[in-house]
Image: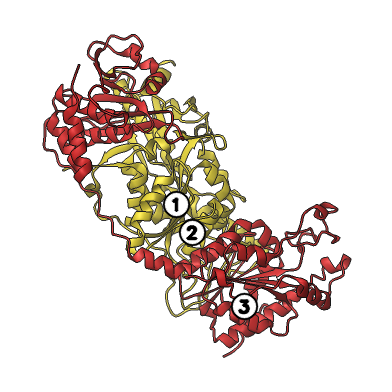
Chain colours: A yellow, B red
Amino acid sequence: MGFCLMEGNEAMAWGAVDSGCRFFAGYPITPATTIFNALLKLLPPLGGICLQGEDEIASIGYCLGASMGGLKVMTATSGPGISLYSEHISFAIGSEIPIVIVDVQRLGPSTGSATRGADGDIQFLRWGNSGGLPVIVLAPVDVKDCYSLTVEAFNLAEEFRCPVFIASNKEIAMTRENIDMDAFGIPRIIDRSSPPPGRPFIPFEVPSDSRTPYFLPIGGRTIVRQTSSTHGPDGYITTDSDEIAGIQDRLNTKLLSAVAEFSFHESFPEEDADTLLLAYGITGRAGRDAYNALKKSGKPVSLLILKTLWPVPEELIREKAGPVNRVVVVEMNLGQYVREIERILPDKKIDFLGRMDGKLITPRQIEEVVFDV
Amino acid sequence: MSSLLNTSRPPVFCPGCSHDRITHALDKAFLNLGFQGEDVVIVTDIGCSGLFDTFFNTHAFHGLHGRALTYATGLKMAHPELNVIVTMGDGGLGIGGAHILSACRRNLDLTLLVLNNFNFGMTGGQFSATTPLNALVGSGFLNRMERPIDVCQVASSAGAPYAKRFSSYAKNLVEEMENAIRFEGFSILDIWGICPGRYTKRNRLTPKTIEDTLAKMPSMKNPVPENLRKEYGRHYRELAAHQKPVQRPTTIERQFTPPEAGRKEVIILGSAGQRIITAGEILCLAGLAAGLQTTQKNEYNITVLRGHSITEVILSPEEIGYTGIERPDVVLALSQDGVERRRHIFENLDDQSLIILGKEIDLPPCNAEVHPIDFKALKIKPHDRALASLGILAKLSRIIHPDMLESAIKYKFRSAVLASAQDMVERAKIG
């Protein structure tokens, strides 16, 4: 067995290509640019398309068009670009357009610090859309996750016809690391499902056993309608409030009810632990080191590293936090995801460790917070 | 061949709205071109022009204000054979200005109909990018200070090969549309019309005054001779066909045993342009050749050839968690910038730590073993010093040995660059 050396962004590009992604559009922005660079090399020789948009709004707009044309699409940016994506994110949610959106987070607010890491967009990704309907957000910890969660992201986008975010971080995206590419094998690939033949196609009609409509591409031999307006199953504007309520409810529950199927995580339970350490993203790695050090020093804690952040995998969190009285949430911001933990674990003592200065949270800082009860 | 109009959803424009004429003319153009519904996608945005997709039995894509060209671009690239018709008003033209310019520059085969009625109809007749200075609008006096644009002049100076303005009441409206759709490349039609619901309530505008005003506008040749060129999609596919396929990344197998056991941490402190990141990568590759796991975390500013450049490399037989370095085993101190940025680490160093130091650099007090190198005397230029320092490290058998380094350099470089890298590693000496 040997290793390759690769940064997270490059691993994402390979994950995308191996998932069947054949369209990428983006606008250059540190620290996401190397995803564009890699896909510009990878996609054209495969017959795929890689475009540089005139701005972020255009880049994601191209993707929405190409996705409705039937291609698997991805775009990548950082916080300032996510802000500009917002109106199209809402569109993709409401009109069920599959797309993978990578946010390589950098230190904000605003243009902030282009070359410093952060996990400051975690609530923004969830709520940065009009209407407030749920989205899927996955968070890689290392270069391996950058590959495998990209594959998962495409599968989820296809299965649920929705935008799927990958909340990366400069510290994963642009950090090189050893990776065993052969260990992944051939990924399991999910494609959006076509309707059974022999019936008229109704663009947003939902099969009886699913909450996600069948898909046919614009440009095929069957006429397809897509619209950003509030629409009924036929893809035309509806003003019927019962119909509208039904659709909103479906868009809400199609993800919330399914999150147990994609609650990606790493769990390290310790029998005698009274504290659960909860982290995600790059901070999960410092969490792992702190967990090991504390175990060695005879003061074990349990550790949960979340890789699905939204919808909040509530069942999983309740289960892992069940045996402990205290949860320490560690994240590279001033306290975002901790709000979710406080919300779903009202009976536990919740402590928080955050940092937002462009530097990584160290294992020692975590150990200190855990000890200093 | 029959009409593509959607009989179950007839147009709902205000009585006297020129959009109605355009709807029927577009249908006639489709008919004359022999299009079936599945041959066409109508892409629309917001406003009255945004209703167009519902009036036709064609593929339809209705999206956000001003962004129709972006969806159209994705659709056309995905389906080169599809006839992509975009409608927008003068509102969408203004808010999507960057997309208009970009579509003109790109020359993808899209047909854009700008339904120009000089105001925002739906929201109350506010002024748009084409509203005359003296018009009475829903934005009070604000339009009096903003000069209207001439869509075709803007489009042709941005590179549109086909940019034509005419009246919704033109006798040859259908023919104009057919010609634009037939044109292989980006075509933009500035179609002037009347908004009876808003604009003409307070402003005088008739088919006759439109005709008179158009007659006074600067004439344009179509297609625009200086802008004629290859269609973007065709050109893209031509160039893409010549791109070389990328090989999957190759694996580095374990060939060596590292000179020292356990986890090792190296910080290279340098400046931008000193190839610090490349040296870090080579160190990682050398580690892989000895079966070690590795991370390389970099820190630099957004400026390209100025400021510090720092790389932190960890080599370890175990999986690596935290990627930062608090107490390095080795520091390569190659620029004052880099040293200043990480001044605090030096106090952590003990006599087990090794520093390879550019002779001219001031170091904070520390207990580490320091090897000053006179790079100038060795004729090693600043951009080679990081690599040369790895040569020294290998000669000292600290963390890597010469075989590991040689294998990494051979993996990374080819031909002349390889030879020069090998020379640099060889040339580096202590003292």
| Nearer to the camera, A188 or A362 | A362
Please name which of the two marks, 2 or 1, marks the residue nearer to the observer. 2
Q: Chain of mark 3?
A: B
Q: Position of residue B129 (x, y in %)?
A: 72, 59
User: Is residue B331 placed above or below A195 in the rendered structure?
Assistant: above
Q: Looking at the image, is mark 3 or mark 2 nearer the viewer?
A: 2
Q: CA distance from mark 3 to mark 2?
A: 24 Å
Is B203 displayed left or right of A102 in the figure? right
Q: Quadrant of residue B316?
A: top left
Instruction: Please name the residue that numbered disc 1 is placed on.
Output: A258
**Pick the front one: B207 or A158:** B207
Q: Can you say whether A253 is above or below A233 in the image?
A: above
- Residue drawn at 61 percent across, 63 percent down: B157
Quarter where residue A70 is shown: bottom left
Question: What amino acid type should be assigned to the residue bearing mark 3?
Answer: Phe
Residue assigned mark 2: A63
Write down the residue under mark 3.
B56
Q: Residue A261: x, y in percent?
A: 39, 50
